[in-house]
Image (cartoon, rainbow, N blue to C red):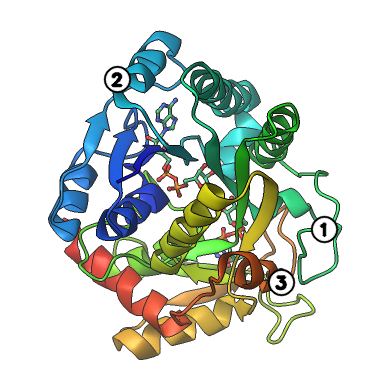
Amino acid sequence: MSKILLTGGAGYIGSHTAVTLLKEGYDVVIADNLSNSDKQAVSNIEKIAGKSVGFYEIDLCDRDKTFDMFKKENFDAVIHFAGYKAVGESVAKPCMYYRNNIDITLTVLEAMAEYGVKRIIFSSSATVYGPLNPIPYVETMKTGDCTNPYGTTKFMIEKILTDVAAVNPDMSVVLLRYFNPIGADPSGLIGEKPQGIPNNLMPYITQTAKGIREKVTVFGNDYPTVDGSGVRDYIHVVDLAEGHAAALKYAFNNAGVEAINLGSGRGTSVLELINAFERVNNIKVPHVIGPRRDGDIAEFYADATKAKKLLNWETKLSVDDMCRDSWNFEKNQK
Ligand code: NAD
Ligand code: UFG
């Protein structure tokens, strides 16, 4: 069976993708420095899938260690999750974000060239569409104009991968532009564990439901949306993981570069998400309306047609499923 390297595979999206790939029969190797994850995730992946994974605790900026791993393992493909992802922190510490996210990518690409690995799937983001495009976002739209260094790293890495593929016609590069991943594996063993005060909406909701936070602040109710609160395209992380399996299959059969949105194609407002969470889990989430958050836009969601056409993939799980599984994971945390 094919052997797949998951950079950053101990993290939130990588761990769910590892489970999906193991269930589909792939051999999985994770390389992660655990800067935003812990080793427990690796044993939980094995517990859920009933199979073992390879694990390297390495910094992927470390060229020698990364090359040694490639030399030993003979990978058939790479799924590249590793990177820093906090928008606010990237504004405060731009060099740290450019250094880590770009450096890892270059090291991995050079190791792939050295050891003849031809396929890479990259964790990009809807953030590459910037604040100026109309919705829904379509892959053919202009990208760039990102409002923070984190987003710019995604845009830059998409460009780097495209340039490398241009001179390697037998290479396959899939740029997956995720919308807003939430939810968790139904086992409750793996999920999103933000360090400190969460920036994103769903972990804030679950921590408030648990009593760790006092209340959720809804950032603005005067946007031109269905109820005035911000609208996003939430996607269950298990659906997202299956999107990676579909992209991998595509990469094994096609050369070239494709950017593909992974979203549901539907928008949900902040208030709708809070209401769904309260209804599905029969629990109160205290919330108040506050001012808009700097840099936010009113509404965005994916045009999900290309993923359906090219990958034969679409989301299956609902917002209710996301609310149930996010809460199930949070309840399990000590
Ligand atoms: P995560 O932080 O849970 O996982 C990233 C992993 O990369 C972590 O386990 C971290 O320890 C590891 N890592 C970071 N720097 C490393 C280094 N130098 N060497 C080795 N490992 C390193 O994040 P996630 O939510 O699973 O996201 C995965 C990818 O998807 C990221 O690239 C992120 O930018 C992208 N993405 C995430 C979202 C989201 O909302 N979660 C949305 C769009 C795109
Ligand atoms: N929100 C609140 N209160 C909160 C947190 C968020 O009302 O406490 C609102 C935001 O204003 C927004 C919505 O909830 O309307 C979603 O906010 P998130 O912070 O959860 O997600 P974003 O859409 O702002 O950004 C996320 C990632 C980015 C990524 C983008 C697109 O954080 O890195 O999705 O993939 F670029």
Residue topped by disc 1: 140
Residue topped by disc 2: 72
Q: Which amino acid does label 3 sit on?
A: Asp
Q: In which quarter of the image is residue 158?
A: top right
Residue 287 visible somewhere in the drawing: yes
Image x and y of residue 154, in percent: 66, 40
Q: Which amino acid does label 1 sit on?
A: Thr
Q: Quadrant of residue 70?
A: top left
Q: Which of marks 2 and 3 is nearer the N terminus?
A: 2
> Is 49 placed left or right of 67 in the picture?
left
Q: From the viewer's perspective, is the residue at label 2 or at label 1 nearer?
A: 2
Q: Which mark is residue 303?
A: 3
Residue 166 sits above or below residue 62 on the image: below
Image x and y of residue 231, in percent: 66, 74
How many residues crowd mark 2 within 10 Å: few (<14), some (14–19), many (20+)?
Answer: few
Q: Quadrant of the C terminus?
A: bottom left
Give the camera-side residue of 310 and 50.
310
